[in-house]
Image (cartoon, rainbow, N blue to C red):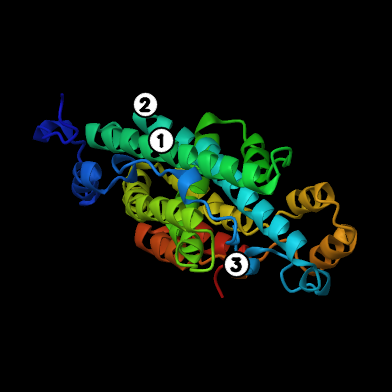
Amino acid sequence: MISQSMELPENHTEQSDNNCILILDKLGKSWSSRAQVKNDEIEVDLIYNPDHDDFIDSLLPFHEHPRYLEIDDETRTLILSSGWIAYNEKTIDIEAKIISPVCNQLIYSELPGTNNHIIRWLAAETLVDEAYHILMVLNTCYTCRKQRGLLELKLPSFDLVNNIEKEVSRYSHDWQKKLVRLAACVVSEVFISDYLSLLANADEVQPVNRITTDYHRKDELAHSSIFRNLTKEIFHHLSYKEKTFFCQVLPLPVHWFASQEFIVWETILNQLNFKYTNEVIGDCRAESEINLNRIDYSELIQLASEVGVFDMIEGKESFERQGLLS
């Protein structure tokens, strides 16, 4: 069997003015020991305990609404289980429609500065991680659906994906479309581990849900470092025109990720025959469609600063327009 860790000749590495390639090389070589896909497979059916909630109340966009606070235990359980399903269906979209396409672009060296074996190799490893995450959440979702009688629950398309595709469609040039997708990927990978920690550390939540979320979280901690350094390397190789465009689109995905996905929740609650759906969703939607408080984007601000986004007037103004800088 060929070893997954490869020593690369010096002339394989594209010239760079920073040490990002060296860091990426170390991350690539650590994959066989850190990747969760290398662990034993989780026996979801054996671990699932129906006495535990599948999700956290505080992650529901309407968890403080009086109508939710007065519901019976059976309805609450179904809503929380539906929340877990929606959370994972969105995870699948993130992995399959946001991260994986960018990994493929890296594998084919379609982004500036990525014609490098180390980057292609690391992108392939990351693609395996993402495929494993999809498999994990598919398994946990199916078990949850089966245990809670939710096999027929149908979800519409998420605002997150819709907004990315809408933004991509605004541009005619392929390089612009690729940089929009890169921005969404970077934003996702930079702060997703913080969101995962909320579930991974919630003792009251279904044990198998915590385990699978923690597996995902551990991989994403490495992915955050990977995409931070990839961003620096790619930005270094962009033309001034490309840098200007990337600076302008980089903060946009923060709002897309902050969507409270009320269309999805309205669809779920209607399928659960929750009689106060219109009141609950209407009240919450009137208050705010977007909730920036639900995500921590401080690391994106730090990355933008390190990359040099704020050294360009377009970058600083773009982050200010999105309300991410005071």
Q: Quadrant of residue 304?
A: bottom left
Q: Is residue 287 above or below residue 7?
A: below
For label 2, the SS is: loop
Q: Quadrant of residue 150?
A: top right
Q: Amino acid at mark 2?
A: Tyr
- Residue 241 as seen in the image, left or right of residue 227: right
| Residue 180 shows up from this direction | no
* Residue, disc 3: 294
**Residue 212 image point, x, y percent:** 45, 51
Residue mark closest to the camera, 2 vs 1 = 1
Give the quarter of the figure containing the C terminus: bottom right
The dot on residue 201 is none
* Residue, disc 2: 108
Q: CA distance from mark 3 to mark 1?
A: 27 Å
Q: Quadrant of residue 225?
A: bottom left
Give the quarter of the figure containing the N terminus: top left
- Residue 275 or 305: which is nearer the viewer? 275
- Residue 193 or 250: which is nearer the viewer? 193
Residue at 86% over, 52% down: 273
Tell which circle, 3 or 2, labels the residue nearer the N-terminal end.
Answer: 2
Tell which circle, 3 or 1, labels the residue nearer the N-terminal end.
Answer: 1
Tell which circle, 2 or 1, labels the residue nearer the N-terminal end.
Answer: 1
Residue at 25% over, 33% down: 116
* Residue, disc 1: 103
- Residue 23 as seen in the image, left or right of residue 136: left
| Mark 1 crowdedness (10 Å alpha carbons): few <14, some 14-19, many ≥20 | many
For label 3, the SS is: helix
Q: Amino acid at mark 3?
A: Arg
**Residue 233 image point, x, y percent:** 31, 46
Q: Amino acid at mark 1?
A: Cys
- Residue 97 or 82: which is nearer the viewer? 82
